[in-house]
Image (spheres, rainbow, N blue to C red):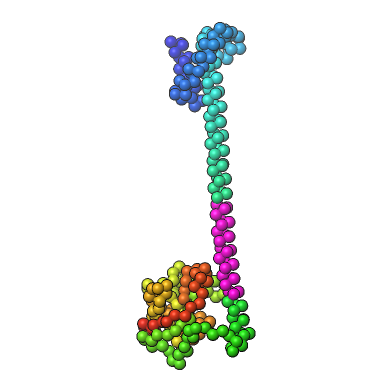
Amino acid sequence: MVALKNLLLLGVMATSLGLTSAQFAQHKVEDEEIDDNSSDSPVVFNKDTRKDLPFLKNNKEMRDYNVLHRQLDDLKKREDERKRKELRKQQEERERKRVKEERRQRELAEKRAQQLAAVKAEQQRQAELAEKRKKTPVSEQPSREPQPRKPTSPATSKDTLNIEFSYYVAMCDSGCTGQTATGIDVTNTVYYQGMRIVATDPNVIPTWSVIQFDMGGQSVRAIALDTGGYIKGNKIDMLVGSVEEANRLGRQVKKVEIIRYGK
């Protein structure tokens, strides 16, 4: 009865230190092998041991207690090592996330800088061309074929005009606000009610007019929702999605049909 009580007390001590029954069973086999090898070395009780562990009555109980104590120490060391590894893993994961976020922010900043540089380069190019045109005498300016005719009066419905096309973007550093002269927000679109958006000279093609022209082998309808300081006479500035697209399209002369004159 006393031996059973002592074993129960040892079990309570094992549970309080985090020892599960499965772990205890696994390590018990290993420790029994150690005990078999060391069974020839008797355990000698001294007075201090008797005093500190009064419930241990013989050498066998003392060996069992020592084995259990070693197992608990080993388990505690393993648990501490597991916690340290888990902590290191969490720290490494946080560091990986931090580095990844920093790299993403750098890439975004570089992309924005490239876009801004492209816009500035295009603005500089346009300014240089405008300055060159001012300095070049009219007689020396190269003629372009076909030459767009200059109407003496505003176009009317179903008229066909030769129009010089250029292309612009919604946002830039030279006054592009993302809103047309008619108050339409175009920061995220180049369409209005399924039609492309263009800027025209209201004296030639009034605002809100609907026009039609060929682009890339397809018939395209557009609506005049914007104006511009450089858009005078037979000129149209068409809204596109990027500076790269605007540079690629350059300047073209197209035949434009007036589908609806004004609003």
Q: Is residue 209 above or below residue 52?
A: below
Tally of numbered discs: 0
Frontmost residue, 155 versus 109: 155
Q: Residue 50 in the image: x percent, y percent?
A: 57, 11
Q: Residue 186 in the image: x percent, y percent?
A: 45, 71
Q: Is residue 36 above or below residue 82?
A: above
Q: Is residue 214 left or right of residue 76?
A: left
Question: Which stretch appears magenta?
Answer: 101-125
Frontmost residue, 126 versus 253: 253
Q: Is residue 220 left or right of residue 178?
A: left
Q: Residue 103 in the image: x percent, y percent?
A: 57, 53
Q: Main secondary structure of the magenta part?
A: helix
Answer whether residue 233 is magenta in the image: no
Q: Is residue 122 above or below residue 153?
A: above
Q: Residue 93 in the image: x percent, y percent?
A: 54, 43
Q: Quadrant of residue 160?
A: bottom left
Frontmost residue, 50 versus 192: 192
Frontmost residue, 123 versus 141: 141
Task: Write the residue at 49% across / 20% down.
Answer: 27
- Image quarter where the N terminus lies is top left
- Image quarter where the C terminus lies is bottom left
Task: Write the residue at 42% across / 74% down.
Answer: 215
Task: Write the residue at 56% across / 42% down.
Answer: 92
Task: Write the residue at 55% across / 23% down.
Answer: 73
Among all residues in the image, which is located at the extreme right? Answer: 135
Answer whether residue 119 is magenta in the image: yes
Q: Quadrant of residue 139?
A: bottom right
Q: Is residue 211 left or right of residue 59?
A: left
